[in-house]
Amino acid sequence: MKELEKKELDFLLNSIRDIKDFPKQGIVFKDITTLLNNKEAFGLLMNHLHDRYKDSKIDFVAGIESRGFIFGSALATKLNVGFVPIRKKGKLPFTTIGAKYSLEYGVDEIEIHTDAFRDIEHANVLLIDDLIATGGTANAAVNLIKTAKANCVDACFLIELRFLEGVKELLKHTSVYSVLKI
Amino acid sequence: MKELEKKELDFLLNSIRDIKDFPKQGIVFKDITTLLNNKEAFGLLMNHLHDRYKDSKIDFVAGIESRGFIFGSALATKLNVGFVPIRKKGKLPFTTIGAKYSLEYGVDEIEIHTDAFRDIEHANVLLIDDLIATGGTANAAVNLIKTAKANCVDACFLIELRFLEGVKELLKHTSVYSVLKI
């Protein structure tokens, strides 16, 4: 497994755009669309993740709606494994397991299908999302994977916002890999 | 370019699950999660699409939120091109172009970033979504691609619901390929 070099990390970092005051005043939003539409940056990222996980005996990649779908599905395809969507409440059509998590104001819920991991017992699942902030969604997602009787091999993020310390709680339940720590 | 054989089409079709009365009474929902988490089915589909488009000089794959992200991003990675998300109104953080379309009751809107196709003039874009029903979203998406001064090479769907005739209007603006016609 090859770590990314400093210049590669800088290239990925510089391909992400900061948008001030989105979605609301005071927030600097990390716009990943400028990484996705840059085939060199997107290719570098996906090749790196493929290289990192190709020998980890992953059975499924699970991605969190909706930016996690983008990275998760691309990686599942490269690893030649199945992809499992974790969605906002009410979006998945079959029977589901739900997990609630706290927002700044109020509560939200994500769901996974009860048969998401088919008939594979203790499947090895790689969880992926674009960004970890306070970690509420990620913790709920790991909870869902475990409740569905699978094993969360790693929780992988393109961006970790270090000052929010979202990884601290998550590390009690799974190992974590963030490509870029900001 | 190799067409899918009858048994391959049947395999893909059988890997999609019908859910009655979702999201509301009287609708039979096509659940694609059972195709996605089946690595043989997902792999067959993505290899077929890669084979179909690998010589089409595609510059970008554009996927419609949110199931179109799953197929679009996987295909962009296989083709080694950039991925462009087309999102519901208010979700994209930079300056956008919007296109409205009619729903059964009311109007909805999708958006694309003004710089989605970077500095490539008349970029060749493959549009992808999981399903075409009445075609409202797909027509709006083709409209967005053209307004952003790019060329829609093909609009590609996993599933076409033939009785809704959504392709009829779409064919006036782009060529169309549906893997499964139901």
Image (spheres, coloured by chain):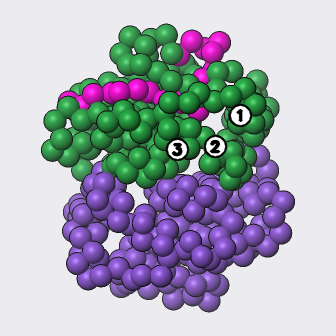
Chain colours: A purple, B green
The residue indicated by pointer 3 is B71
The amino acid marked with disc number 2 is Leu
Q: Is residue A95 visible?
A: yes
Q: Residues within 10 Å of mark 3 (few under 14, many from 20)?
A: many
Asked whether residue B150 is drawn in magenta, I would say yes
- Residue B106: give x, y in percent of width and height: 48, 23
The amino acid marked with disc number 3 is Phe
Please tell me which residue is depicted at 43% across the width and 64% down the height of the picture: A46
- Asked which secondary structure carries label 3, the reply is helix
Please tell me which residue is depicted at 38% across the width and 29% down the height of the picture: B141
Q: Nearer the viewer, residue B40 or B115?
A: B40
Give the Cα distance between marks 3 and 2: 12 Å
Q: Which of label 1 and label 3 is nearer to you? A: 1
Subunit bearing disc 3: B
What range is drawn magenta here? B149-166
The residue indicated by pointer 2 is B44
Among numbered discs 1 and 2, the one appearing first in the sequence? 1
Give the Cα distance between marks 1 and 2: 8 Å
Give the Cα distance between marks 1 and 3: 18 Å
- Residue B158: give x, y in percent of width and height: 58, 32
Question: Relative to residue B121, is residue A134 drawn left or right?
Answer: right
Q: Residues within 10 Å of mark 1 (few under 14, many from 20)?
A: some
Question: Relative to residue A119, is residue A32 drawn left or right?
Answer: left
Question: Relative to residue A31, is residue B70 drawn left or right?
Answer: right
Q: Is residue A17 above or below residue A177?
A: above
- Residue A34: give x, y in percent of width and height: 27, 56
Q: Nearer the viewer, residue A26 or B133?
A: B133
